[in-house]
Amino acid sequence: MTQYLISLYQPDGPTPPPEFLEPIARKLQALNEEMQKAGAWVFAAGLHPPTTATVLQAKESGDIVMTDGPYVEGKEHLGGFTIVEAPDLDAALEWGRRIAEITYLPIEVRPFQGEEDPSCVP
């Protein structure tokens, strides 16, 4: 089985009010429990706002440049993720589709590199 990263992208800006987020959180928890029962769920987590990020970049001089905040400027940021094990991309996309239906956020599904997929050799 291949592991897939399901990334949730959310818009920058203030956090929506609890009355908006609580039903989404309940539905996501139920889906996480369903994925666990199906043996697909590996790990899931939300992230702090992008303002808490620190980017490290090595320079040819050997120096490391450290910058506060996200690496890219944008109107959306990675807000959380789920890692699933699935027999193929279609099965992983089905879990991603279900998360998209709950959150209405853009969802990216991407396989991890590994021996299971020779096209993903580092």
Image (cartoon, grey):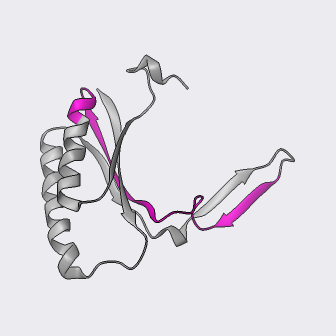
The residues colored magenta run 63-91
Horizontal and vertical percent position of residue 119: 45, 19
Q: How many marks?
A: 0
82 inside magenta stretch: yes
- Residue 48 percent across, percent down from the top left: 44, 69
- On screen, 32 above or below 20? above
User: Residue 97: x, y in percent?
Assistant: 21, 46
Q: Residue furthest front?
A: 75
**31 or 74: nearer the viewer:** 74
Q: Position of residue 106 (x, y in %)?
A: 32, 54
Hey, which quadrant is residue 116 in on the image?
Answer: top left
Which residue occupies 24% across, 38% down? 93
Work out whether 100 lies above or below 119. below
Q: Is residue 111 above or below residue 117?
A: below
Q: Indicate left or right for 108 with 93 as reference.
A: right
- Please name whichever residue, 98 or 82, is drawn nearer the observer in this view of the structure: 98
Q: Judge left or right: residue 122 versus residue 39.
A: right
| Closer-to-camera residue (66/13) | 13
Question: Which residue: 67% across, 56% down?
Answer: 56
Quadrant showing the C terminus: top right
Q: Residue at x 44, y 17 (%)?
A: 118
Which residue is situated farthest in the top direction here?
A: 118
Q: Is residue 109 left or right of residue 112?
A: left
Q: Would residue 53 be found to the left or right of residue 37 on screen? A: right
Q: Residue at x 43, y 70 (%)?
A: 12
- Identity of the residue furthest to the right in this view: 61
Check the picture and name the quadrant holding the N terminus. top left
